[in-house]
Amino acid sequence: MTPAVRERLQVRAPLLLISAAAWTLLVVEPGGMTMPVYCSAAPGAMPPASLDLLLALNPPASLAAGWALMLAAMMVPLLIAPVRHIRDRSFAQRRIRAIVLFVAMYGAIWMAAGVMLLAFALAVRLVVPGSSVPVALALAAMIALVWQLSPVKQRCLNRCHAQPALAAFGPAADIGALRFGLTHGIWCVGSCWVLMLLPMLVSGGHVAAMAAVALWLFAERLDSPMPPRWRFRVPGKAVRIAIAQAQMPLHQFTRPQAAK
Amino acid sequence: MQYTRGNVWELGGDWADPILWYARGVAAMKARKLAEPTSWRFYGAIHGIDPGLWQQLGYLSLSDPMPSNADVQRFWKQCQHGSWYFLPWHRGYVLAFEANIRAIVTKLGGPADWALPYWNYFKPNQYPLPPAFASPNWPDGQGDNPLFVQQRYGPQSDGNVYVPVDQINLDAMTDPDFTGVASGGSPGFGGVDTGFEHGGPVHGGIESQPHDNVHGLVGGGDPDNPQLPGLMSDPDTAGLDPIFWLHHANIDRLWEVWQQNPPANVDPTDPNWINGPGNIGERVFSMPMPNGNPWDYIPGDMADLGKLDYTYDDLSPAAPAQPGQRLLQFGASPEVVKAIQGAGAVPSGKNVELMGANQGSLRISGGEAGTSVQLDTGVRRKVTASFAAAAEATEPDRVFLNLENVRGLADSTAFQVYVGLPQGANPADHPELRAGSVALFGVRKASLTDDEHAGKGLTFVLEITKIVDALHLGNAFDVGALDVRIVPVRPVPENAQITIGRVSIFRQGR
């Protein structure tokens, strides 16, 4: 194992464990506190009669807890690179503190974004008849597609790879970690918001939809930043790695002839 | 057939046969169109290409037919920098280029065993640019010498091209670890474990020194427009300069010299290095060969130069490692040191941690700039304790200065870095306090927010173990801060916008 791999593991392993624990909770309790009622409404069901009823069925605390769990499951694996940057560039005794501050601010941005995304999802449930929810989903999917193709999406994605210089001492270090969490959170929301909306609009297979989106978000983060423009963007590196891994046992690299 | 690469300064004349044949080969490659994979410019683009910069420098016009998309995707923008693939990728690149030149040489009736010369600027009096590259004329006086490049400006950007030997060193040759880390400690002799990396932020030891520095010092910048680099100064244009290949032959030679010191110095045995990025689904290293076919290779094929039927006329050790010398100065007994010397160099410790940092970013503009790196007392004491333990033959900590997130627009920028220089002291009077020289090879590209580096810039790692050792032995290391002074090789123009995000110091120990 190379030194770099060892260092990568020190960050990757705990973050993936946290994510796995969150996924386990989501899978074990898909109908419990982790899954708001709006998510589990059957296709064709009548929409709730009023906002009051909807909120009664989906208390804000429960919504927030569910959203936070969803973030832990889906977003924590995306934090491997920035957390590694903070770990590497902070004093050993400040590493945990700096990472906690970064994650707290990053999480706060996503919780704030969650208010808007959840409000939108609830509004869809309130105003769109149950039989038309798939139409709303299709509309959201179209918006997502346009967003995914757009240069703005690429711009956000590029900035998710930023690794700024961090202050090392005292309050400046704390502020630096918070600021990094803030900017990383904003660009991450910009990159992911519309894809995060999709699982909330599906009427069934909610966890499966979340898993698919999470996998996509993780895969597209593997690609290097590139100049923003309209383009059909697939996470090519992830696909190639997956294919290579699948073929690995049978793979015989074609031995080249030496250049002479 | 066995091929031997010879010293360009010792071939028997300014235009000795191997140089003359090289020039003829270069001329033939330059005559080919960009779209031809074996053309000069195509080979330059394999290293890197920025179409806008190429147009500005006159190497690309809008009327140039472009290669097929498949060729561009397969071959262009391949160079591996800031990666443990730096040495093997460039070995394959030079081999393939050399094979193309040789095909032309033999076609013209030249020797079948022609091999690329190398430029060993370290050897006494061999620091100037070889004369055949400095003259616009062929030896018969005709004025279209293909080895001559207008955009090669030299260390002072005045057209006088040479390598100032006080600004380069072979310190990396004594690093026993091929693979390093990007977390502030040693980046290793060969670089940091990465995937396919067309320009990572942290360069390996031999890549930083002398590789990067020679690039920047030879290339320099256009004195009339400092943002325009000499060809050698920027990775996106470097492969267009014929001297590039002699420089890289020398870097390749240094890898071979480093390998001559087993068991301490060994290439990585990790399958990801041996099989290369293509094996895990990333891009494959691939070069167009004279027969028109691509040649794919992996680092494992490049590790043994002998198996490739190549050698150099001089593989004498550049700077023999002296394991145990540090222990001796810290009080270890000669018997203990002797035992260590028998075992070869001691690999670096695994624990890398921050020891101190400055506050705020540092702008480099005009002449000197300085900052103060505040040290954490606890971590500094760990280093001191490791010195004390050295008497029992425990390898003491190594210490590294990091210039983090260096950003800017001018790759030709180069500066020297001093640690602990007294206020008002003349840097030239204190070579013992020089941490090293830095050339910003690749900084322009690394500073673009919407390019593959996301604007992170480059991070330079300079080993300052010797300076810290001396401070400790002189009872001067018990300090709260260390001053760092940046001394540009030539004035840095304001519009180069050079900034250092943070200056920090790391320890690497057990």
Image (cartoon, grey):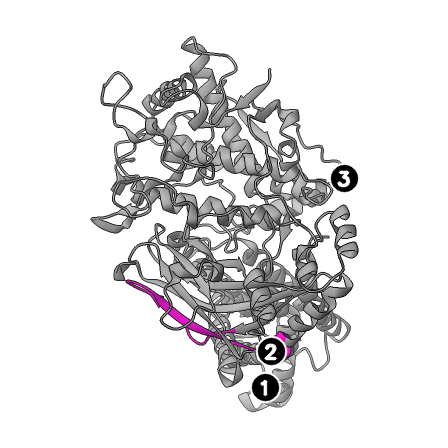
What amino acid is at disc 1? Answer: Leu
Q: Nearer the viewer, residue B251 or A191?
A: B251
Residue assigned mark 2: A46
Using the image, name the chain to which the residue with label 1 belongs.
A
Residue flagged by tag 3: what amino acid is it? Answer: Pro
The residue most toward the left is: B224
Q: Is residue A232 above or below residue A97?
A: above
Q: Nearer the viewer, residue B404 or B285?
A: B404
Q: Do tags 3 and 1 sit on the same chain?
A: yes
Residue occupying the point 71% across, 72% down: A18
- The mark nearer the N terminus, 3 or 1, is 1
Rendered location of residue A121, percent (x, y): 54, 76
Residues under labels 3 and 1: Cα distance?
A: 53 Å
Determine if marks 2 and 3 fall on one subunit: yes
Q: Chain of mark 3?
A: A
From what the image shows, is residue B69 above or below residue B420? above
Residues at marks 2 and 3, CA–CA distance in whole angstroms? 53 Å
Q: Residue at x 37, y 46 (%)?
A: B217
Distance, label 2 to label 1, CA atoms, is 12 Å
Residue located beneath label 1 in the image: A54
- Residue B13 rendering spot, x and y as whole percentages: 38, 21
* Magenta residue span: B357-380
Mark 2 and mark 3 lie on one chain; the one further toward the N terminus is 2
Q: Residues within 10 Å of mark 1 (few under 14, many from 20)?
A: some
Which disc is residue A249 wearing?
3
> In what quadrant of the picture does the C terminus of chain B appear?
bottom right
Label total for image: 3
* Placement of the N terminus of chain B among the 4 image quadrants: top right
Residue B88 position in % (x across, y down):
58, 37
